[in-house]
């Protein structure tokens, strides 16, 4: 009994409370339809890294300088905000807003960049037609985006994993900023996109 209690105390001491975690995103570009978004975190001062990952899509072309088509440019990004019920015209629901980025050509500026899915501002689905609804996750091609990072979610018409929900929970449980809305500081919870 004492050994089990001692082991549990050691585990709690080495892992630490979630509020003490320091987290950040990484994105490994593989293809537009199948790349990897990860949330990584540590419990300072320990250097041990923990990771959870999900399949993510980005862009419809692999040229990061193509506005509205290319995948997310490589490099570091500041996270500018996070919402649970975002009400944009093209992006809604649970979203993370990341900074604008100049791509590798040094002059083309990519703007309106998010981590998001296809859902309504109330975190639901609007699956009303036989075609591709912009706020309903129906098919593999929904991983395509206008250059953002997109995660799958289940819908009434397709059985995809709830990667958006898992990423959202992991973000809040392991070092993500608790506040919602636009952030006052642009250096909170950064994202690194690998080339």
Image: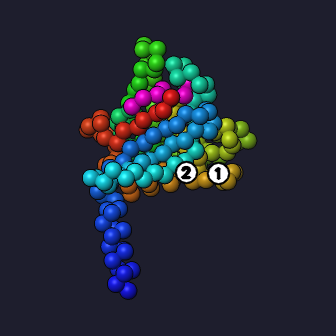
Q: Which residue is mark 1?
A: 160
Residue at 55 percent of width and 33 percent of height: 29
Q: Which image quarter: residue 46? A: bottom left
| Tag 2 residue | 163
- Horizontal side of 43 relative to 83 (left or right) equals left
Residue 179 rendering spot, x and y as whole percentages:
31, 49
Q: Is residue 144 visible?
A: no
Nearest the camera: 75 or 117? Answer: 75
Q: Position of residue 187 (x, y in %)?
A: 30, 36
Quarter occupied by residue 1? bottom left
Please report the residue visible at 49 percent of the width from the left and 52 percent of the height from the top. Answer: 52
Nearest to the observer: residue 135 or residue 30: 30
Q: Residue 145 at x, y = what percent? A: 57, 32
The residue depicted at 48 percent of the width and 45 percent of the height is: 38
Q: Which residues are magenta?
A: 70-76
Question: Which residue is outermost to the front?
Answer: 3
Q: Residues within 10 Å of mark 2 (few under 14, many from 20)?
A: many
Q: Is residue 3 visible?
A: yes
Tell me the element at label 2: helix
At 44% from the left and 55% from the top, the residue drawn is: 169
**64 on left or right of 19:** right
Q: Image height check: is 172 above or below 9? A: above
Residue 88 among those drawn in magenta: no
Are circles 2 and 1 on residues that touch, CB within 8 Å? yes
Query: Where does the image place residue 63, in percent across and percent down from the top left?
Result: 56, 21
């Amino acid at each position: 009994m004492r050994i089990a209690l001692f082991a549990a105390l050691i585990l709690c001491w080495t892992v630490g409370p979630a509020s003490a975690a320091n987290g950040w995103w990484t994105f490994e570009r593989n293809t537009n339809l199948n790349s990897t978004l990860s949330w990584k975190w540590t419990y300072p001062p320990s250097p041990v890294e923990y990771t959870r990952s999900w399949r993510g899509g980005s862009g419809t072309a692999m040229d990061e300088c193509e506005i509205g088509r290319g995948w997310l440019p490589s490099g570091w990004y500041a996270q500018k905000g996070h919402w649970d019920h975002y009400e944009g015209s093209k992006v809604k629901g649970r979203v993370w807003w990341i900074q604008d980025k100049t791509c590798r050509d040094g002059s083309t500026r990519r703007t309106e960049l998010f981590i998001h899915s296809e859902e309504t501002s109330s975190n639901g689905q609007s699956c009303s037609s036989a075609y591709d609804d912009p706020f309903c996750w129906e098919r593999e091609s929904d991983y395509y985006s206008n250059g953002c990072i997109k995660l799958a979610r289940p819908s009434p018409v397709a059985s995809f994993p709830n990667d958006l929900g898992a990423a959202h929970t992991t973000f809040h449980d392991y070092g993500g900023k608790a506040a919602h809305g636009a952030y006052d500081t642009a250096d909170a919870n950064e994202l690194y996109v690998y080339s």
